[in-house]
Amino acid sequence: MDLLDWARGPLLTGAIAVFVAGVGWRLFCLWRMPPAHGPGAPARHAFGVIDAVAASLTRMVPRGGFRPSATLVTVNPYLFHVGLAVIFFGYAPHIAFVRRLTGLSWPALPDMVMYLAAALTIVSLLMALLFRLSDAVLKKISSADDWITWTITFLPLITGMALVSEPSAATLAHEQAIYRGPLAIHLLSLELLLVWFPFGKLMHAFLVLPSRMQLATFFGRRGVHS
Amino acid sequence: MIDRDVFHGFLEAIHHLPEMAQPAPLSDDERVSRAKSVMRAKTDRGLALDLEACVHCGYCSEACHFYQGTQDPRYSPSRKLDLLRRVHARESSAFAPLQRLFTPDITVAELQAWQELVYDACTECGRCSMICPMGINIARGVNVMREALFEAGLAPLELMAVAQEQAGRGTVFGVGPAELKRTLDALRAQGIAIPLDEPKADIMLVSTVIDVLLYQDALAATARILNHLGLNWTLRSAGFEAANFGLLSGSETLQKAATKRLVDEALAIGARTVILPECGHAYPALRWEGRLDNGDPLPFEVLAVSEFVGREITSGRLHVTPGEQGRKITYHDACKLARHGGVMDEPRAALKALGMELTETTPTAEKNWCCGGGAGAFLINRAAPLRHKAWEIKRRQIDDTGADTVVVSCASCRLNFMAGAEADQWSTRIDSVVEMVARQLPA
Ligand code: SF4
Ligand code: SF4
């Protein structure tokens, strides 16, 4: 067994296990905390779960009424979130990888779109790093989690880009992976991300909906659009 | 008319508040342990979610008047919850045993440093939550921090003094039933009927120390409107104070006691409605957080006076005569009344009925800037320069409307506006919703 066999086999299984167990444990630990005491007063407007979900989704749209900032640009986080999603779900070799694991597959996006998305995402993540290093507020509130998470998110992008030397169709046509070492490194970087996921702020992917719903309900019952 | 001498006397009294406080002599270890036990007890599922969800994006700073006024990154809203976050990480989070290896415990020096952050530099206005992409309720976390600091004997002396007075003597700034009666007698001498301590009434009106001492016109205006509508109402000496210094200082016990005084009186007279004065924080404290002893919802309706007046006008029960034409007014939403209370449309409906030109500030309503004086911040002497920086944002916002009058519906905001106006020689008129409406009651 070479490194790629390890990365594709036991290490991947282990990373997925840590990811699933870790995320599950973290969510369970939150859920087992004592519930916030129930709302006492009658609501100004009825505000149910559907309203809360709707409010959570509309919170994705940037709100007017706040000061624009030179550095905390609103657009950058959209870029890397969308970019990462497009790269992971749209690139043919990634879809092939998911199909091998789960049997699920879907049509891929053209390679050119992927290259563009990857380039934009890399620039956007570098910008996010630059902001964090240069903005006084971000410097003050950043913790080890922020630096570790940035690095661990950036690694799969870089190691993945290092692999791209031919069209994805050609890559997929090979019986065997040709760059076994670099592919192993790429997979290991993904596994690192999966292992880190439950421990740091990547968890926001799972927390964003309940957290927004909670706030939307708090304000919504009071008749306030949040 | 506002008596400027009383206003200055009030400011003077605030200067002397620290001398009246009786801080508990606690060791450093006791302070840390008391603070942590409050943090532990208050970290429920909702707060834990808020503490864990922050992605450190810093957007909340864009919304906070204390950060925007100073550009000091210490005042970033997210940071105000750091100590809570650390205690939760070490003690109740999913990976607490691991977290303890990397997360230092909180210290008394940090608690002392956070006093400024959660009292002077946060009015619990909730504006940061409006922009936070994760939807974190920072104001709630700040309130828990205040409770922790209060228990640790580390609340600012001014708030500690008023809270202790309200808990001990039942008065605020020396105002109790006797002072209320004196004010009512003075208003009655002007021909305004004001029922006090009626054994039964449909409506219980609540007042507040600032109205009893300074904004007596607001109290008189409310009485005139209630009388004009022919309603059956009363004030109660044993439950007339809307201000809740338990809530502001961080004492949950006192907060509950202050709420209970109002609730008990309302129940005793069989009130169907409790009308709160122009006092921002009193509204969410009773309307949204008030409960019966057994935890049940209150069996009566709670309305802010501006909400009541707006509702009466909209329903057609209350008519007003057209006011001074050509007067250009703007309305300042008190954070606790609007963003945290949902009272936004009713005061506007009342003002529109007055026939003046109402221009909105930008932003407005639930996104409005805080004036910087809420949640007890106005009482903290050392915070005056910081408060003024926050106020400057508010002042610019009002100036940009071109209005000659800013109308408020919270006595705390009004005090802060008056202090800001005096410091800046600001000539914009500061008025109150209920007083403006009462001035235009048909003869
Ligand atoms: S609640 Fe208001 S004052 Fe407090 S941190 Fe948020 S924006 Fe600032
Ligand atoms: S805006 Fe919300 S997620 Fe971002 S730093 Fe502030 S509290 Fe945290």
Image: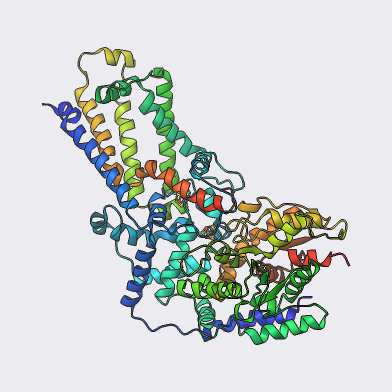
Foreground of the two, B188 or A175: B188
Foreground of the two, B19 or B246: B246
- Position of A89 with respect to B388 (left or right) is left
- Position of B97 with respect to B183 (left or right) is left
- Position of B331 with respect to B49 (left or right) is right
Relative image position of residue B436 (x, y in whole percent): 79, 65
The residue lying at 49 percent from left, 75 percent from top is: B254
Foreground of the two, B242 or B67: B242
How was this image coloured?
rainbow
Res. B367 in view: yes
Q: Is residue B390 above or below residue B212?
A: above
The residue lying at 44 percent from left, 32 percent from top is: A82
The residue lying at 49 percent from left, 72 percent from top is: B256
Relative image position of residue A100 (x, y in whole percent): 25, 22
Considering the image in quadrants, where does the N terminus of chain A appear? top left
The residue lying at 29 percent from left, 59 percent from top is: B90
- Position of A193 with respect to B324 (left or right) is left
